[in-house]
Amino acid sequence: MQAVPCRCEGKPVKTKKSQKRSKSTDGAARKGPAVRFIEPQKKDRRKISKKVYNRELRRLQVELVELQEWIKQKGLRVVVLFEGRDAAGKGGVIKRITAELNPRICRVVALGTPTEREKSQWYFQRYVAHLPAAGEMVLFDRSWYNRAGVERVMGFCTEQEHREFLRSCPEFECMLIRSGILLIKYWFSVSDEEQEKRFQDRINDVVKRWKLSPMDLEARSRWVEYSKAKDEMFKHTDIKQAPWYVVPADNKRRARLNCIHHLLSMIPYRDLKPEPIKLPPRQKDKGYVRPPITDQTFVPEVY
């Protein structure tokens, strides 16, 4: 049976194709290849209530489970990249995508600082090790684009290494696509004001404070430099075979729903009805005597 596109009934995904200079919500004016935006219609820019958000999220998560089964049964290999400034909402949407999925099929990769050995390797080598096998989907919480962002702005790579990345990255991604990998790239775009609000929230909330690192604070002081680096990155890597999809992320709920809806629309699939599950009868003990319960050590019942 032929696969059909996602059956989601959410808001449509708009595509802006313009070679004119335009301003994104997270930095300087951009000039270069057209960039696709995932955004709601203007009339729907009001806040989404918690009730509506939870209802729509649940519906989309059911679709994600169906997509997961399709990926498994058809042996697809899917890679999804999530990029954006600090506190843009990348981790939040990844958490909602994976919440109801099988971690053996859909896994998250969030690599730390490269080791001295990794620094001596081909730049893409440590990412290749995490690419999916047949029947898997891998979500990269930041990816090889670190070289075009944080490494470029913070001086962790040389000018020559940065130029080489911009030249070789499209070739690397085209190679992945030719090998059969489905590659989808998202950029979460957050405004200066919203990022500051989220940083303040992390500072004032003891359970969120760990999310704010000295590197995040330094990056904020270099906002314009990051804007320039991001625009240059888009200019070289927003290719037809692997375009960037920009998610306006000032509204967390809307950004999550729009991104998940778009992800579902990018992979044609259908619901593979599973075989009915029937629980077998429990095995009878047939005279087996269990040890005394007093022999076990229990967690204190504090609550």
Image (spheres, rainbow, N blue to C red):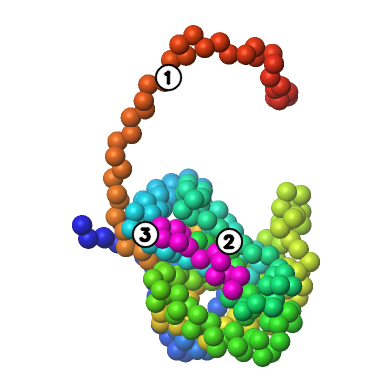
* Residue at x 69% of width, y 16% of height: 295
The image shows residue 237 at horizontal and vertical percentages of 51, 83
Question: Farthest residue toward the left?
Answer: 1
Q: Secondary structure at mark 2?
A: strand
Q: Is residue 261 above or below residue 152?
A: above
Q: CA distance from mark 1 to mark 3?
A: 36 Å
> Can residue 127 be found in the magenta stretch?
yes
Label 3 or label 2, whichever lies nearer to me, is 3
The image shows residue 30 at horizontal and vertical percentages of 55, 86
Residue 82: which quarter of the image?
bottom right
> Can residue 128 be found in the magenta stretch?
yes
Q: Which residues are magenta?
A: 125-137
Q: Is residue 127 above or below residue 173?
A: above
Picture quarter with the N terminus: bottom left
Q: Which disc number belongs to residue 75?
A: 3
Comparing 81 with 104, the one in front is 104
Comparing 5 with 50, the one in front is 5
Q: Amino acid at mark 3?
A: Gly
- The residue pinned by badge 1 equals 283
Residue 166: which quarter of the image?
bottom right
